[in-house]
Image (tube, grey):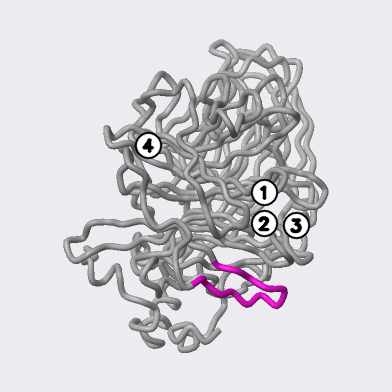
Amino acid sequence: MEWTKEQRYRTLKEAGGDEMAELKARVDSCPWRQMFHIQPGTGLLNDPNGFSYYNGEYHLFYQWFPLGPVHGLKYWYHMKSKDLVHWDDAGVGLEPNDYYDSHGAYSGSAIEHEGKLHLLYTGNTRDENWVRHPYQCLAVMDEKGNISKLDKAVISSVPAGYTDHFRDPKVWKEGDTFYAVIGAQRTDETGCIVLYSSPDLLDWTFEGEIGTNLNPFGYMWECPDYFELQNHGVLIFSPQGLAPVGDKYQNIYQSGYIIGETLNVQQKTLKHGDFIELDRGFDFYAPQTMVDPNGRRILVGWMGLPEIEYPTDRNGWAHCLTLPRELSIRNGKLIQQPVAELQALRGPETKAEDTIRNESKTYDGFTGTAYEMVCEFTNIDAAEFGIEFRVSEQEKTVLTYDAAAKKVILDRTLSGEEVGADYGTIRKCEMDAAKVKFHLFVDVSSVEIFINDGEEVFTSRIFPQEDSDGIRFFASGGSAAFQAVKWNLRQNPEEGQRYDCNEMAMLGK
C-alpha cells in the first residue's frame, strides 16, 4: 500500500474507533507478535525516548505512528515498569497538537527537576510548501503521571550554519547547569552534534558545536547521547551516510559511540578514540541510555531501521524495542550485558554438555521459539563451530565462530521471510578468543546475541515459520566442547498495548 501525505498525517481522532478496531484485529492475527519485547499495539514503533527513573518507576516512551507500519504523525507512547521486565501500558504520553509539534512529537529525553519529570523533545512542523521547521519543546509530568506541555517552544530556531535537520535533544545536569546535545546537519550536509546550556530547562543558550575528529563522517548525526562512565566521556550517536568498510557499516544507517576524556563543556571538545559500532546485527538504531537508582547506565535501542520494509507491515505494525542492557567499559570498549532483572522471565531449564567433532547434533529439550540460552565453547580445535536455531527442514538462523578468520558470523539467509536483503544477509565482526560464549535471547521474531559477556552484540529481526523451532550445535574441521543451558521464557503479561479502540481514537485513555 502506498501511503499518501494526507494518510500519514491523520490523527488518532480522525481515524476513529472502527478503523482502529479493524487495524488491531489485523495486528493481533500476526504470527510474529513478540512474547517478551515492548512492541506497538498497532502501527509503527521507532526511537526509544524519555528513558528515565522517576517516582519509583522506570519510564520509557517510544515514537509511535498508530495508524500503520509507516513513518507519519508521531506520538510518544508511554510504558512504565518497576523492574525493567514487566511493563505497564501508560497510554499516549505526548500528542502532536500544538503549533510547535503539529507534524510530530519527535525524539527527546527526560530529566527529573523540582520533583517532576521534564521531557525535552523535538517538535516537527511543516509549512504550506512542506518545508520543515524544528522546535525544541518541553513537557512536564507530575507524580500522578499527568503530562502537560508548555505553551511555547523552549528553542525556537536553528542556529546559523545548520539545516532544518536539527533534532533529538538529550539532556543531563552538571552542577547547577543543564546541558543538552542535539543531532544536527551543517549547511554543507555533513553531520555533527551541538551543545546547549540552561539554568532551568526553560531558557537555553547555544554553546556551539562539539569538536571531534570525525569530520566528515556521514551527512546527519541522529539521537546523540552523552554520559560519563568509569571516568570516561562516552558519546553515542547514529550517523547516516557512512559507506561500508570491510565488515563495518553494513546497515542502511549505523549506531555507535566514541570514548575518550570527559567532555569539556567550556571548550566544547571531546578527545576520543575510534568510532565503534554498538551492535553488529541487522536491526539496531537510535539507542538511548539512562542512570538507574543504583548508578547503572542502562541502554535500550530501537530494534529496527528506517526505510526498510518488514514482513509484519502487511499486518499493520512494525518494530519493537531491545531488551534493557547494562553498560560498562572494558579495554576501551563499551560492554553491553542484559540487565540481571531479566532472569525473572526464566521458566523451565534444560542443560546439555558434549564434545562434537565434524558433526551437527540436537539434544532433548533444546527446541523453542521464545527462550534464553547460554552456550560456552572450550577446548577448540575446530575450524568453525556454533549454533543453528529456529531450525526446520527449510529454515535456520546460523551463529558461527570462524576460528581461522577469528570472526563471529550471523547468517539469516535462510531465517524465513526476507527482510532488508538489499543490505545483505550476513553480518560479521572480528573477535580473537580462546573461549567463546554465546548468550541468546530468542523471541518469536527476533534474536539478541551477547558474545563473550557483552564484548559484541548482534541484534536482528527474523521471520521464520512457527514450526521452525529446532536448535542444533555444530563443529567442522575438528572438535569443540560445549556446555549449554536454556530457559523457556515466560510471556510478559503487561507488555503490548491493550486499549479500547474508541477510547484511544478520542485520546480518552
Q: Which marked residue is nearer to the observer: mark 3 or mark 2?
A: 2
Looking at the rendered structure, the secondary structure element under dot 2 is strand
Q: Quadrant of the C terminus?
A: bottom right
Q: Which marked residue is nearer to the observer: mark 3 or mark 4?
A: 4
Label 1 sits on what residue type?
Answer: Met
Label 3 environment density (alpha carbons within 10 Å; few <14, some 14–19, many ≥20): some
Label 4 sits on what residue type?
Answer: Gln
Label 3 sits on what residue type?
Answer: Leu
Label 2 environment density (alpha carbons within 10 Å; few <14, some 14–19, many ≥20): many
Which numbered disc covers residue 240?
4
Q: Between 483 and 419, which is closer to the camera in this rendering?
A: 419
Quarter of the image where one finds residue 421: top left
**Magenta residues (range):** 139-150
Q: Mark 2 or mark 1: which comes first in sequence?
A: 2
Q: Which marked residue is nearer to the observer: mark 3 or mark 1?
A: 1
Label 4 environment density (alpha carbons within 10 Å; few <14, some 14–19, many ≥20): some
